[in-house]
Amino acid sequence: MGEFEPGCINRITKTGFFIRKTKLDELPELFNVLKGDMSLVGPRPEVERYVQIYQEDFKEVLKIRPGLSDFASIKYRDEEDILSKQRDPEQYYCHVILPDKLQLAKYYVEKMSLKKDLAIIGRTLMRVVGGSLEK
């Protein structure tokens, strides 16, 4: 799992770091929103192998269209940094982060509303703009 190796962060260019930090690398997903495959707000899509681990928990979450942002993407905006500090990033993701993300996704599915969506959009914009100003 090379993407979580702590030493790899030093190989990222300043431009690459800026693109990742400001989430500009996710702009292509806007095409998925325009196509109708995704929405602006909703649980982020998850890697299939992790969905298989928590199949029962994902049943409710997978009933709605995935989104560009949700409570979990705000909370775990620095997920790569968190994982890079773990001795076993895969284990930590599977047993700590993913269960929490699932709880947040289930909460969103239960309480979906325009008001919550607008709050998530606002928080996301604040994190992206605020996060890019931090460095």
Image (spheres, rainbow, N blue to C red):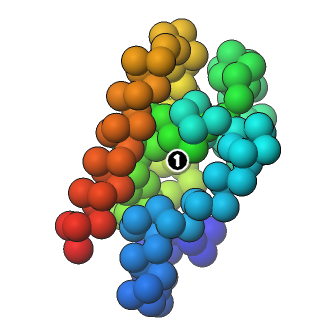
The x, y position of residue 102, in whole percent, is: 55, 28
Percent position of residue 22, x then y: 40, 65
Q: Residue furthest front?
A: 34
Look at the numbered disc 1 and give the secondary structure of its residue. helix
Which residue of the protein is positioned furthest toward the left in this rendering? 134
Residue 17 sits in quarter: bottom left
Closer-to-camera residue (104/93): 104
Observer able to see residue 105: yes
User: What residue do we see at 41% from left, 28% from top?
Assistant: 118
Residue in the picture at 20% in, 67% down: 134
Q: Is residue 14 above or below residue 67?
A: below
Q: Residue furthest top?
A: 110
Q: Nearer the viewer, residue 127 or 95?
A: 127
Residue 87 appears in view: no
Q: Quadrant of the C terminus?
A: bottom left
Residue 68 horizontal side relative to residue 97, left or right: right
User: In the figure, residue 115 lies in which quadrant?
Assistant: top left
Residue sitting nearer the eye, 130 or 118: 118
Q: Is residue 1 left or right of residue 59?
A: left
- State the residue position of label 1: 93
In the image, residue 39 above or below residue 129:
above
Q: Residue at x 23, y 67 (%)?
A: 133
Total number of numbered discs in the rendering: 1
Q: Residues within 10 Å of mark 1 (few under 14, many from 20)?
A: some
At 72% from the left and 45% from the top, the residue drawn is 34
Quarter of image, res 74: top left
When the figure is inspected, residue 119 is found, relative to residue 47, above or below; the finding is: above
Residue 6 against residue 92 in the figure, above or below: below
Q: Position of residue 113 (x, y in %)?
A: 49, 14
Q: Quadrant of the N terminus?
A: bottom right
Q: Amino acid at mark 1?
A: Tyr
